[in-house]
Amino acid sequence: MSDGPNSATRRAVLENGLAVAGAIPVTGMSATAAPPDGKLVFTYDDGPVEDYTHTYQRAHRKEGVPACSAVPSSYVGESGNVSADQLQELADEGWEVMSHSVKHRMLGPVTVTRDIAAADRRIYVEENFHGSFPDDTLVVSDGSRSTTVTVAGKGSDDRGKFIGVESSVGQSFSASDDVSTHYTEDIVRMALEKSKRQLESYGVNVTNIVMPYAGYGERTRKMVDEYYTAVANAESTAGGNPQIMEPSEIRLPHLSRMLFREGSATRAQLGTLLDTIASQNGLGILGGHSWWQERLPPSRIRMVIQMAKDRNIDVVTLRTALSDFGITATTTSRTTSATTNAPTANPPTTETDQLGLGVLAALAGIGGAAALKRYGDT
């Protein structure tokens, strides 16, 4: 779908909160109303068609506010996922399209749970995310020693979940030495760079990313700001302890968000989050999934939007929120020689410093099971 004659105007209305005759006011405010008290950003992961048919058409469009759709680039147009035309329409309506990697790879490290013998061809791990793509190359490391293996597949047995590798590991490791697996640099870079390039080939602008499974280790942190301004879920919480970011304290690219599906955050917790955003004139990011298993119906989304409007909070995209707050970062492509030295917010000191995989599974969607079923083998 190409941009229509009024698409630029419509996009400006939704992204900048302008009042236009005949249009629903984006934030529920008149052009002469007081400035908004803080910013709220909605992000939806995985790019299912429900982002368009449910979350957009039945919630955000009815409330006149935009959101962000984080899309694995290789799934655009596949059965059950948004099409390129739908992505373009979302962008025309003020939505922000974000990267969610190419094939939903978990780009952070995963902890090894059992000792590894040199002859082993199974690596037991907390979650076997890294076994989803045969022929991927993985690094097994304890921080001082490492070896590279090729993925053959994944599975589970009475000893736990494992990654199968094509040939023996070749080195022994003790699980007590904080051993983990992580992708090689070329795979991480491919997931970051190619996803941005593929999505932008559909005519949308991509400046931010949501990490699949909230996987975000030290290696990924060192590379991500070569391609993106912000990581919306660098730190996440699956309910409670709402993450509020005051503009003066934001250090790109590392941002925080909170999941808000039913069973994850109560109305009271959401009210606390919104009250804090309004009182601090801060930034809050909410995350979820539009597909039916997520327990995030349009009615719940509209409830939260209306709660934000009642508090005079501006519901915008992440790109707009950062721009309105005057927060910028230098993003470069790999083809340039520029470098970025953006400070990090509490960066990990080793590759194994990461969110626990039980938390990762919860952050992935609905406790992990449905999310893994949807994307674990693709």
Image: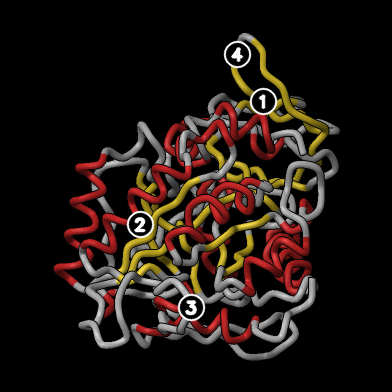
Residue named by callout 4? 159
Dots 1 and 2: beta carbons under 8 Å? no
Q: Position of residue 234 (x, y in %)?
A: 44, 58
- Work out which residue is located at the far left of the displayed protein and give it: 279
Q: Amino acid at mark 1?
A: Phe
Nearer to me, 312 or 373: 312
Dots 4 and 1: beta carbons under 8 Å? yes
Between the C-alphas of marks 4 and 1, the distance is 9 Å
Q: Nearer the viewer, mark 1 or mark 3?
A: 3
Label placed on residue 162: 1
Residue named by callout 2? 305
Q: Position of residue 47 (x, y in %)?
A: 65, 51
Mark positioned earlier in the residue sequence (2 or 3): 3
Between the C-alphas of marks 4 and 3, the distance is 63 Å
Mark positioned earlier in the residue sequence (1 or 3): 3
Q: Amino acid at mark 2?
A: Ile
Between the C-alphas of marks 1 and 2, the distance is 42 Å
Between the C-alphas of marks 2 and 3, the distance is 21 Å
Colouring method of the image: secondary structure
Mark positioned earlier in the residue sequence (1 or 2): 1
